[in-house]
Amino acid sequence: MSGMKSDVKLIDESGKRIDGRLFNEMRPIKIEAGILERADGSAYIEWGNNKIIAAVFGPREIYPKHIQDPSKAVLRARYNMAAFSVDERKKPGPDRRSVELSLVISNALSSVVFLEQYPRTAIDVFIEVLQADAGTRIAGLTAASVALADAGIPMKDLIAGCAVGKVENTIVLDLNKDEDNYGQADMPVAIIPRTKEIVLFQMDGDMDYQEIKNGLNMALDASMKVYEIEKEALKNKYIKLAGGDSDE
Ligand code: ADP
């Protein structure tokens, strides 16, 4: 989010956005669970032009030993963007942004996993962004939550989310890269669908109270749709394992 004014027209006279969506439309989402053999759980997500893999390992022995917690497992998520995931080659390795995103994603996931069942262990979650087009923290969190369930790790629920934002003074759902670059605000939200508890909430840009309220409601509705897609992905994996036909 640059907050930069520009000549780019982000919403046309008929209310269509640059990729043809209406203000309250999400980009298409596809999730596949159980794509990696060596991981305990995994998922691949395509969310618009985002392409992201999540892999889960654990509960397993924790290194370095001194960070172990005698009362519960330590869940460590690492968000990483591949050097080729963005237009300009991204410098490989962790930067301030990926460290922050790793932390907010770890916190969100920790709120649903029954960590106290696995004291002194680590649950490691790797999120690899292969192609980025805005909304990667929520798409990555979505994939990670499906991967944790795929690993059979006990959870009270999945996590589901969606970002909202503001472009041309309009609150819109699920910003793409151009909207994120040239728009006025970006507000990623993630919830525990069953309880509607908010487990990730960030805001970058300018929105007033009413706009935040409207945006939050739009994000909650969208999250419930994402939740259905997540559950469908997990179901499809078991249909495949049982040798039956999935929907595809
Ligand atoms: P999110 O991906 O969750 O929306 P940001 O708002 O920080 O997170 O980033 C928006 C988009 O900007 C990313 O999805 C990506 O397409 C792009 N981006 C982020 N970091 C970089 C970077 N270091 N180099 C180039 N593009 C980047």
Image: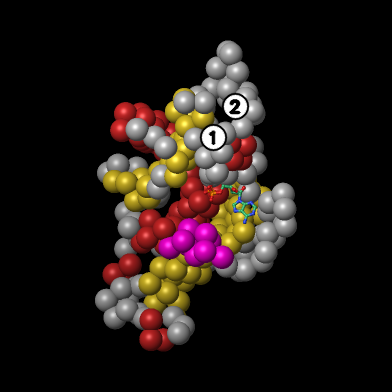
Is disc 2 placed on a helix, strand or loop?
loop
Picture coordinates of residue 105, whole percent (x, y): 44, 58
Q: Is residue 222 above or below residue 191?
A: above
For the residue carrying disc 2, how many other residues have a C-alpha within 10 Å: few (<14), some (14-19), or many (20+)?
some
Whether 100 is among the magenta residues is: yes
The numbered dot on residue 218 is: none
Determine which residue is flagged by label 1. 183
Question: Does 189 appear in magenta?
Answer: no
Nearest the camera: 141 or 18? Answer: 18
- Ranked by sequence position, the earlier of labels 2 and 1 is 2
Q: Is residue 215 visible?
A: yes
The colour scheme of the drawn protein is secondary structure
Q: Residue at x 37, y 60 (%)?
A: 107
- Answer whether labels 2 and 1 touch (C-beta < 8 Å): yes
Q: Amino acid at mark 2?
A: Leu
Depth check: give the residue in front, 110 or 152.
110
Quarter of the image for the C terminus: give it: top right
Q: Tell me which corner region of the image, top left, top right, bottom left or bottom right, holds residue 212.
A: top left
Q: Quadrant of residue 117?
A: bottom left
Q: Amino acid at mark 1?
A: Gly
Q: Which residue is mark 2?
A: 10
Q: How many marks?
A: 2
What range is drawn magenta here?
Answer: 95-103
Q: Is residue 181 above or below residue 130?
A: above
Residue 162 visible: no
Q: Please name whichever residue, 207 or 248, is drawn nearer the observer in this view of the structure.
A: 207
Residue 110, position in %: x, y? 36, 61
State the SS at label 1: loop
